[in-house]
Image (cartoon, grey):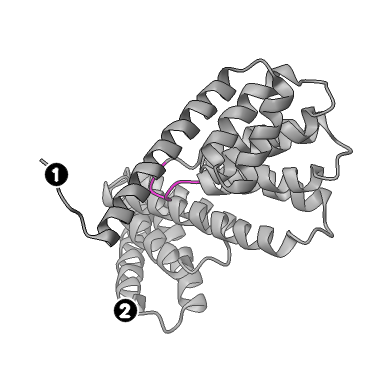
Amino acid sequence: MFVNLHPMKRLTTIAIILLTISTLCGCKGYDKMLKSTDYDAKYDAALRYYNEGSITKARQLFENLTLYYRGNEHAEDIAWYYGQSLLKSGYYYNASYQFKVFTKRYPYSKNTEEAAFLSAYCKYMESPSHTLDQSITKDAITELEQFADRYPQSIHIPEVNSYLDELRNKLMQKDYEIAIGYYNTESYRAAVVALNQFLNNYPDSPHREEAMYYIVKAGYVYAINSREDKMKERLQQVVSNFDKFAVTFSNSKHLAECQDIYTKCKAELARIENSETKLQNN
């Protein structure tokens, strides 16, 4: 059955058919190039795809070329563009590795500094939420710090410092939540230790007030549930921690609660001292 199409619809249909044919031919041409042993042509094609924005095709061709051209005239360019292709594809872990290898293999290249930065940047991009394991975050911090030490005049330094602040804040948040987690699970001794360590590691933390508050609370619960021979020393530590808190945060919303803990500590210490006095008199 013959269907008489409107001229515009006919042109649109023809354009779609031509585009489909072109795409299929292009795919066949790419597949053929991927399998080709004409490595010079493959290198030229990889560059062309990269410059045209066909990053997936470029990446696969550059990956294919890395082994063949190792040590040859195009090896450095292939390594560089392969790393860039991985980066633009969002394969940050592999890109970081590729750029790090580039800096070691081509230490005097014009792209060595940029490769060092991109290796660290990719680690930064791989850093997960603070609720997850922070091993990659720590690696990213190390690599960014190493870059800043090696290239202190780099145009990337402001960017690097911004990334470092973000990653350090992520570690700080992780450590704070771990420390508070000990308190919430009634591991009061561990909470006091972790919170004190947190304050040592992050003296300017915005969580400082809360950390000192929980040190007083956790310390008190831990102290009053201690053996009699340990209680006095631990209550005295709570009193000392309260004094620090009251001086540092005299307007804290937690001050009244901590003051009540302080009063209970003093009363318990007075009881212990009276008991000790009676024993000495006997």
Foreground: 132 or 263? 132
| Relative to 102, 267 lies left or right | left
Residue for badge 1:
2
Percent across and percent down for residue 3 are 14, 48
In the rendered image, the vertical position of residue 142 relative to residue 40, given as above or below = below
Q: Of the numbered discs in the image, which one, if any, rests on residue 89? A: none
The picture quadrant where one finds residue 57 is top right
Q: Is the residue marked by circle 2 packed among few (<14), some (14-19), or many (20+) residues within 10 Å?
A: few
Q: For numbered disc 2, what is the local secondary structure? A: helix
Front disc: 1 or 2 = 1
The type of residue carrying mark 1 is: Phe
Q: Of the numbered discs in the image, which one, if any, rests on residue 256? A: 2
Residues at circles 1 and 2 in contact by the CB criterion of under 8 Å: no
Image point (82%, 21%), residue name: 71
Image point (36%, 69%), residue name: 262
In the image, which residues are magenta?
Answer: 127-132
Foreground: 92 or 45? 45
Percent across and percent down for residue 126 are 51, 44
Return the residue found at the far bottom.
251
**Quarter of the rendering occupied by the N terminus:** top left
Image point (36%, 77%), residue name: 255
Foreground: 50 or 192? 50
